[in-house]
Amino acid sequence: MIKKQGRTYVVLSEKTGRSFGTYDTKAEAEKRVGQVEFFKHAKRRRAKG
């Protein structure tokens, strides 16, 4: 999840509230969310194969 705090965007875990970084632009924050999602799902793929 992305939250705007002042002039920056913060990437947070929806379940735990853990921060995955602070970014100057929404595009940078969205890129980070994509990275987090990729690795979250990559764990499942490795376990199956």
Image (cartoon, rainbow, N blue to C red):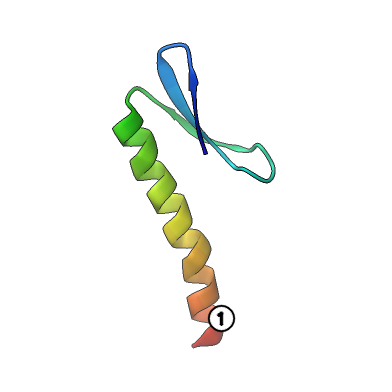
Question: Going by the image, does 31 lie left or right of 33?
Answer: left
Q: Name the residue under label 1.
A: 47
- Residue drawn at x 66%, y 37% is 17
Pick the front one: 21 or 27: 27
**Where residue 4 sits in the image (x, y, percent)?**
47, 21
**Where residue 47 sits in the image (x, y, percent)?**
56, 81
Q: Quadrant location of residue 13?
A: top right
The residue sitting at the top extreme is: 6
- Residue drawn at x 48%, y 77% is 45
Depicted 26 relative to depicted 33: above or below: above
Q: How many labels does the image show?
A: 1
- Amino acid type indicated by mark 1: Ala
Question: Going by the image, does 28 lie left or right of 2?
Answer: left
The residue sitting at the bottom extreme is: 49
- Residue drawn at x 47%, y 69% is 42
Label 1 environment density (alpha carbons within 10 Å; few <14, some 14–19, many ≥20):
few
Question: Going by the image, does 24 lie left or right of 19?
Answer: left
**Where residue 35 sits in the image (x, y, percent)?**
40, 52
**Where residue 6 sits in the image (x, y, percent)?**
47, 11
Depicted 36 relative to depicted 30: above or below: below
- Residue drawn at x 46%, y 56% is 37
| Helix, strand or loop at mark 1 | helix
Q: Quadrant location of residue 38?
A: bottom left
